[in-house]
Amino acid sequence: MAAGRLTVEVRRLGYRTALSEPTDLIAGDSVRIDFTLAPNRELQIFDTAAMFLTPVVVTASKRSQLLDQAVTSVAIVTDTELARRAVNTVDEAIDKAPGVQFLNGQVNIRGSTGYVQGLGSRVLQLVDGVPTNQGDRGGINWDLVPLEDVQRVEIVKGAGSSLYGSAALGGVVNVITRDIAPGFHARVRATGGSYANPPHDVWTFRDYTGAEEGLDLTGAYGGDELGGSLTGGGWHSDGYREQDRRDHWQAAAKLQWRPASGTRVTTAGSWVSDQAETSLFWCTRGTCDDRGQAYQPFMIDTSGRGAFTRSDKGYLSATLERAASASLAWQARGSWLRTHFIDYQPGNNDAATADRFGAELRAVTHPADGRVVTVGAEGARSDVTSDIFGDHSQNELAAYGESEQRFGRARLTAGARIDYIAVDGGGLSAVVSPRVGAVLETRLGAWRASVGRGFRAPSLAERFVSTVVGGLVVIPNPDLGPETAWSFELANAAHLSSAVHSDAALFWTEAYDLIEPRVNLSSIQFRNLTRARLAGLDLTLTALPLTPRLTTALAYTFLYARELAGDGVPGRPLAFRPKHLLTLSADYQWRAVSVGGDFRYASRFERVELYPNDDRLAEKVLDLRAGVAQGPLSVRCRLANALNYIYNQVPRTLAPVRTLSVTLTWTY
């Protein structure tokens, strides 16, 4: 923030607006301003403006900026939403974000990824700006950060390779953890719940009701110079189907040190240990006690009995931030991510250990009035030891830069990144990813437009995997090349009234050499398609109808996803992409009591890989919730899939059934 005299205004839904006294801010210095917000108990003076305050985001341009100044679409999930939905992991909440869908744990932003079990995400995950995609499979561990430590999640839609490089072809998800507040703070979170039994007796697979339970403890202390937090806990689940038990343990820590004004050193890390039974496909006639049924969705093939996975994963990062002057700030960080798993299967065990080391140096400067320049360099190395991927390494080097210039109500942005990637010590291959964009503030809202090129290098697992899945042989393809795409977006964000806000975006992606699995009767292999197209509409409406205590939201995505050429069929739909995706949400707050719900509709997939002749259904899932908060205590109930809709997102894998959970939280 530039030096000078400033006044800070604070708004929060349900509280009266607070305004600070004028304060002088000196270049390179920091000022602390304390606020006490008084509850607003009078409906007629309810502050609706607090609902539509423009938030600050840090992911779209690798620096702080107002949301309506970003040239690409960004969705935000706050800690309030995480708590209200009473979920256990981050993915359970961001699944309701506009344009986002999860398929058996794999994230799709505007249909970018489709579905491949555990391999090759086209979305980059960050934790406080640190890349945390797996070094071998390229996938995402959504439970890497305890939910209690999450402040908010920022979701950047569209190609982000101009700043983030490979894996950001379809978007970026940045999990931002809590800052350490002054004084001592503690939190205890206990969860318990149960799963619905099968709706038909012929599907019954156990003689008891499955349960889940968990406990998390957090303690933190912040002083003037030094602060830290520690979180630990775990949970157990019986699962909702046969062979679906899971035990999860985790610990996380964060330490912040301010040795001087304008300087902050942050170290953070976590470790997660899991043991989970493996239930890949449901059983069909003759492969289990089918009881005369064509398939048993709650049971598994007897040949897979006893399979389970033991996994450990963790990360460690250190970041130095320095505000050198009013016009220059820089940051240096280093990180280490480790993943290890062993799949215990009848007659065959698979294992892999991957280490990913990363470093980055970045600077943000304001060389002239209205201009912001971001430059940086980044490097990473992945080492993989595995009996199904082989022993391989990958080195990555990159440099990037981006400049934003303000012209009155308009902002123009241009930048590019160049990445060099080498596998197993081979020659470096270079990829350039440019981006240009503009934002124009008008009476009809803020208009934004952007054009960018994205790319994703194939993960080491996609290149070299050699195993058997569900009776199909997975064949390696060492010649697999990177996939690239040009992404276009035209969007508008506007306040239609004091109680209605809209954000609408038209998007278009031309993808080249898209990596998709090719399946025949006996094998699977990853190959580069020549060309594909993904285009559509992303619409979000947020409103306070009738009363400010009622908050409603509508999110709709229309997607056209087609192969255009290659070894597939031109004009054929891309697999695992719904044409229509709709989420309706509503929450009502009355004093300490809140009630709400989400309804999600995803149209029937036009095409799937594996078992394409199986019946497919649209997804129609209703989640309900209620909560009471009084002083340091809160109790929240969640009824997920309240109608107990039986469906599957991926072939022969039952999606979660109705689940009732209760979460008790005590905060000091």
Image (cartoon, rainbow, N blue to C red):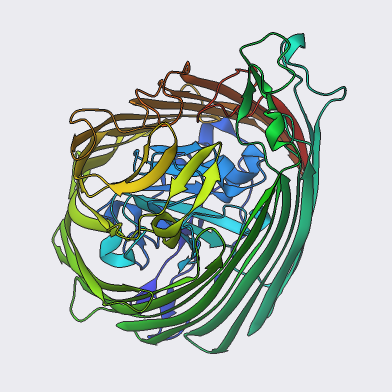
Left or right: 640 in relation to 196: left
Q: Position of residue 463 (x, y in %)?
A: 39, 58
What is the residue that sits farthest to the left in this orientation? 407
Work out whether residue 71 or residue 126 is closer to the camera in this orientation and state it. Answer: 126
Is 280 drawn above or below residue 176 in the view shown?
above
Q: Residue at x 19, y 28 (%)?
A: 571
Q: Position of residue 82 (x, y in %)?
A: 60, 45
Q: Position of residue 583 (x, y in %)?
A: 45, 28
Residue 436 visible to the viewer: yes
Q: Residue at x 56, y 55 (%)?
A: 141
Residue 489 visible to the viewer: no
Q: Residue at x 66, y 10 (%)?
A: 293
Which image quarter holds the N terminus?
bottom left
Left or right: 504 in relation to 18: left
Q: Residue at x 41, y 23 (%)?
A: 612
Work out whether residue 445 or residue 216 is closer to the camera in this orientation and state it. Answer: 216
What is the residue that sits farthest to the bottom in this orientation? 260
Work out whether residue 494 or residue 191 is closer to the camera in this orientation and state it. Answer: 191
Which image quarter holds the C terminus?
bottom right
